[in-house]
Image (cartoon, rainbow, N blue to C red):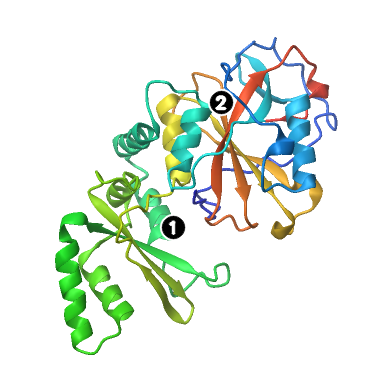
Amino acid sequence: MGKLICDSTTSSPVIPWKDPTATAAPAPSPITAVDLSDQILTTTWDDVSGLEDQQKRHLQRLHTKGVLWKNQEQAVVFRLSHGGDVEADGNCLFTASQKAMNLKEINATDLRRRAVRRFLEDLGSDREDVDAAIRHMYAPDLRSGWGIHVVQEVKLLAKKVDRQSLDSAIDELVSLGMQRELAAESIYKERCIAVENGETWGKYMLISGSPDDEYNIITLQYTEEGLLTVDENREGHAAAFGDDIAIECIATEFKREIYVLQAHGSDAMVDEDNCVFFLPHRPRSEICGPPFFLFMKGTGWCGAGADHYEPLIAHSSSVISHEKVAMVL
């Protein structure tokens, strides 16, 4: 699963579908033969589940004609294939990225740790803006935002070693006549760590749902009327969904751009020409290699969570003219 920042001040710009023949452009430099696939098994777009016909048509066009990526030194045309399903266990951003980059030496958990380490090392002068973005996602002001969201979530971190004492405190309030969910909300908000700044985001994003995690994720869900549910995550399987901050950290760690290819269906209320588009995520450093690509099946236009990342495998194509590609990134 992945959580996508909707705030325009923190999200990357959208690259909509566009016809490269519509405007003249200077000819690119010679295309470098870079193949990121390295014999990885791929799936044809017709065989990918959960896609509508209009999405498949656009995605197949991307594969057949390719997308053009270029920087000051080189230009490359990539044909994009689906890299297969990944488990929807909260780690999909990291699993999909590991597969898309064809990393042999590290797994998804290692990649998650490297992303967090990069974030903490780079946290500097823009800390105030970063903290504001984190609060917006994980500790929102429940007095606002209801024009966009039907349900808002507050994320809290509970130390695993504190679970027994937390339960005792909740039971004590219940014995005094308080409803169980309201008692849990009160104790968790009082004693757990809110995800509201860079430091706590680092603790949160390290959680992969494994027995080795130091913290469990507690999720409080609210509607405009008040508390809806308390997810106590007693089994400890909940993982921190990779967000836009994590994607940028991966890009920075590997000094590569990441393009997230989003495909929205009829539920998103977009026309067919705009049902497929790219979201670019650029490193906070120099770019030292070709981009890699991820695929997101959007469940609705707001994109505020409940989306799933899958790997895209990029194959370099033979030399092709600028006018014949499906899209220019």
Q: Where is residue 207 in the image (x, y as percent from the top left)?
A: 32, 47
> What is the three-letter code of the residue carrying label 2?
Pro
- Left or right position of 123 against 301: left
Packing grade of label 2 (10 A; few <14, some 14-19, many >=20) is many
**Mark carried by residue 291:** 2
SS label for mark 2: loop
- Quadrant of res 229: bottom left
Residue 284 visible in this rendered orientation of the protein: no
In front of the other: 310 or 198? 310
The kind of residue on which mark 1 rests is Met
Q: Residue at x 20, y 55 (%)?
A: 160
In primary-sequence order, the first of circles 1 and 2 is: 1
Residue 57 in the image: x percent, y percent? Answer: 80, 39
Badge 1 crowding class, 10 Å Cα cut-off, few under 14, some 14 to 19, many 20 or more, is many
The label number, if any, that marks residue 191 in the structure image: none
| Contact check, label 1 and label 2, Cβ < 8 Å | no
Where, by quadrant of the figure, is residue 250 drawn?
top left
Q: Please, is residue 33 above or below residue 26 in the view?
A: above
User: What's the residue at 56%, 16% (across, down)?
Assistant: 38
Position above or below: 63 against 58 = above
Name the residue tied to disc 1: 137
Q: Where is residue 65 in the image (x, y as percent from the top left)?
A: 78, 25
Q: In this view, does 118 lie above or below 198?
A: above
* Residue at 50% over, 29% down: 99
Q: Which of 162 and 243 is in front in this view?
A: 162
As helix, strand or loop, the secondary structure at mark 1 comes to helix
Assign the C terminus to one quadrant of the image: top right
